[in-house]
Image (cartoon, grey):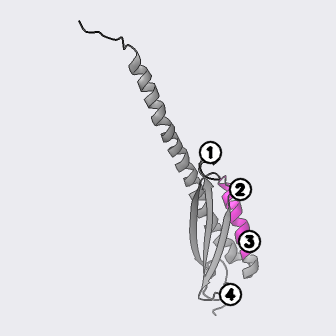
């Protein structure tokens, strides 16, 4: 006669452990994707708003200040109050005077979001996901300017 061990109930324990082992990474992936998507919406809105603010400003210096302020507010609206922010403005065909003639303003907003639930012990600070958005707008869309 064979020696049969009683294995009653072990399938439930194995199923619970397997479920936990699969659920934790899946939960992290869902939270991370959600955080990155929130950041992507934020930088896209920031770039669009910064372009409009720059174009509405009377000159390039005040336009840069307005663009940075509006971009920071747009990120805050998406829940990214403390996120790092870089706003870069370029213009064509008049790089020295964006508020002239038929200039096209291009605003690039760079930021990043922290990935959730990862400890700092994994490499000197919480891991971040870089985000970038660009928006171009002709200066004449928001104000009437001289032809050149």
Work out whether mark 1 precedes mark 2 in sequence or the reverse, and give the earlier one.
Answer: 2
Marks 2 and 4 in Cβ contact (< 8 Å): no
Which of label 2 and label 3 is nearer to you? Answer: 2
Work out whether mark 4 precedes mark 1 in sequence or the reverse, and give the earlier one.
Answer: 4
Label 2, secondary structure: give it. loop
Q: Residues within 10 Å of mark 2 (few under 14, many from 20)?
A: few
Quadrant for residue 106, please give it: bottom right
Tell me which segment is drawn in magenta.
Answer: 64-79
Query: Would you name the residue on which mark 1 appears?
Result: 119
| Image spot of residue 93 (x, y percent) | 59, 88
Query: Would you name the residue on which mark 4 appears?
Result: 97
The residue sitting at 36% across, 11% down in the picture is 6
The label number, if any, that marks residue 82 in the structure image? 2
Q: Nearer the viewer, residue 57 or 86?
A: 86
Q: Residues within 10 Å of mark 3 (few under 14, many from 20)?
A: many
Q: Disc 1 versus disc 2: distance between alpha carbons? A: 19 Å
The residue sitting at 69% across, 56% down in the picture is 76
Work out whether mark 3 precedes mark 4 in sequence or the reverse, and give the earlier one.
Answer: 3
Number of numbered tags placed on the structure image: 4
| Image spot of residue 56 (x, y percent) | 70, 76
Q: Nearer the viewer, residue 148 or 84?
A: 84
Q: Disc 2 versus disc 3: distance between alpha carbons? A: 18 Å
Label 1, secondary structure: give it. loop
Q: Disc 3 versus disc 4: distance between alpha carbons? A: 16 Å
Query: Would you name the residue on which mark 3 appears?
Result: 66
Q: Main secondary structure of the magenta part?
A: helix
């Amino acid at each position: 006669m064979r020696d049969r061990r009683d294995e009653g109930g072990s399938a439930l324990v194995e199923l619970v452990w397997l479920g936990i082992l699969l659920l934790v990474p899946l939960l992290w992936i869902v939270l991370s994707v959600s955080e990155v998507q929130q950041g992507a919406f934020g930088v896209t809105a920031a770039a669009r708003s910064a372009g409009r603010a720059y174009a509405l400003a009377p000159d390039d210096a005040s336009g840069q200040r307005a663009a940075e302020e509006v971009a920071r507010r747009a990120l805050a609206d998406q829940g990214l109050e403390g996120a790092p922010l870089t706003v870069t403005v370029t213009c064509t065909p008049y790089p020295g005077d964006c508020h002239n003639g038929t200039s096209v303003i291009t605003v690039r907003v760079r930021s990043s979001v922290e990935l959730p639930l990862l400890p700092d012990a994994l490499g000197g600070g919480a891991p971040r996901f870089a985000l970038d958005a660009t928006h171009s707008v002709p200066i004449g869309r928001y104000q009437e300017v001289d032809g050149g």
